[in-house]
Image (cartoon, rainbow, N blue to C red):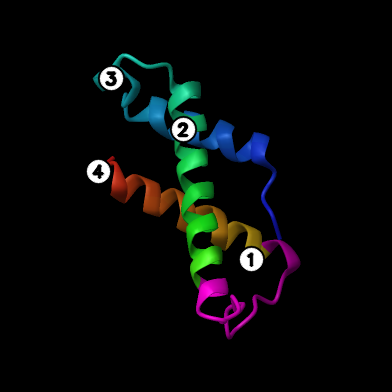
Amino acid sequence: MILDKTEFIKELEQVINKHSRENISNTPDFILAEFMKRCLEAGEYLIKRREQWYGRENHPPTTLPSQPNEMEEIRKHQAISEILEIFKI
């Protein structure tokens, strides 16, 4: 399930703004959020191409959530956690 990109970027903007990370580079939070989204997409592309190169498929998690929206929430929180860790927010 793919997250609504508009909602995802808005949440990134909020996290960046909450921690005043836009002040460090003097770059508006919406530009940083778009940059971070594109970094994630580049990483996803890299992993997909690597897996294709090795002839492997991307496998879904071994345990699926019981609720349809639960997976979306899990992915959203994982992505935000990884971003926070990368940028040490």
Q: Is residue 62 magenta?
A: yes
Q: Nearer the viewer, mark 4 or mark 3?
A: 3
- Identified by mark 2, the residue type is Phe
The residue where tag 2 is placed is 35
> Which numbered disc flags the more N-terminal residue, 1 or 4?
1
Query: Do the numbered discs 1 and 4 sit on residues whose CB atoms are within 8 Å?
Result: no
Q: Nearer the viewer, mark 3 or mark 1?
A: 3
Task: Return the x and y of residue 68 as percentages of the image width and height.
Answer: 74, 67
- Identified by mark 3, the residue type is Ser
Magenta-colored segment: predominant secondary structure: loop
- Identified by mark 1, the residue type is Met
Q: Which mark is residue 25?
A: 3
SS type, badge 3 = helix
Task: Return the x and y of residue 75 as percentages of the image width and height.
Answer: 56, 59
- Identified by mark 4, the residue type is Lys
The residue where tag 1 is placed is 71
> Which numbered disc flags the more N-terminal residue, 2 or 3?
3
- How far is mark 2 from mark 1, CA to CA? 24 Å
Task: Return the x and y of residue 32 as percentages of the image width and height.
Answer: 43, 27
> Which numbered disc flags the more N-terminal residue, 2 or 1?
2
Q: Nearer the viewer, mark 2 or mark 4?
A: 2
Quadrant of the snapshot with the N terminus: bottom right
User: Residue pushed farthest right?
Assistant: 68
> Which numbered disc flags the more N-terminal residue, 4 or 3?
3
The boundaries of the magenta stretch are: 51-69
The residue where tag 4 is placed is 88
User: Residue pushed farthest front?
Assistant: 53
SS type, badge 2 = helix
